[in-house]
Image (cartoon, rainbow, N blue to C red):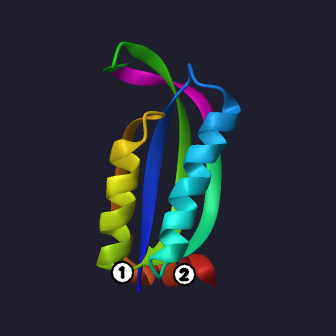
Amino acid sequence: MRPYETMIVFDTTVDAQAIQAALDRALETIRTHGGTPGAIDRWGKRPLAYEIKKRKEGYYVLAEFAGTSATVDELHRILTLADEVLRFKILRRVERAARVAQA
């Protein structure tokens, strides 16, 4: 398994419970496809650099996880289908940096 991180920008017009439900679905997807969720860092509401779907603000969440390419593919599919998500990006972390962060 390789280390990954994803930045998810949620729509601020939906309530906090819907954001948490979407985040829980993403974490459950990671678990069911052989991955292990790591640290979750909620950055909160922040202004967007440019408008996305006529929104000027987003709720940012940074999630770390370890998984296979199948885990990443399914997470990508789930986040693409979620109406609460404005934008997301999944990146593979450098393994050496991930080991240093764990120590």
For the C terminus, give its image quadrant: bottom right
In this view of the protein, which residue sits in the foreground, 73 or 101?
Answer: 73
User: Is residue 103 depicted above or below 83 in this figure?
Assistant: below
Q: Is residue 92 visible?
A: no
User: Which label's residue is closer to the chain start, 1 or 2?
Assistant: 1
Q: Amino acid at mark 2?
A: Val
Q: Residue at x 56, y 19 (%)?
A: 13
Q: Say if the magenta span includes residue 46.
A: yes
Q: Is residue 53 visible?
A: yes
- Is most of the magenta stretch helix, strand or loop? strand
What residue sits right under mark 1 in the picture?
68
Q: Residue at x 49, y 78 (%)?
A: 35
* Number of residues whose C-alpha sits closer than 10 Å to that of mark 2, classed few (under 14), some (14–19) or many (20 or more): few
Determine whether the residue tagged by mark 1 lies in a helix, strand or loop: loop
Segment colored magenta: 43-50
Residue 4: x, y in percent?
A: 42, 69
What residue sits right under mark 2 in the picture?
100
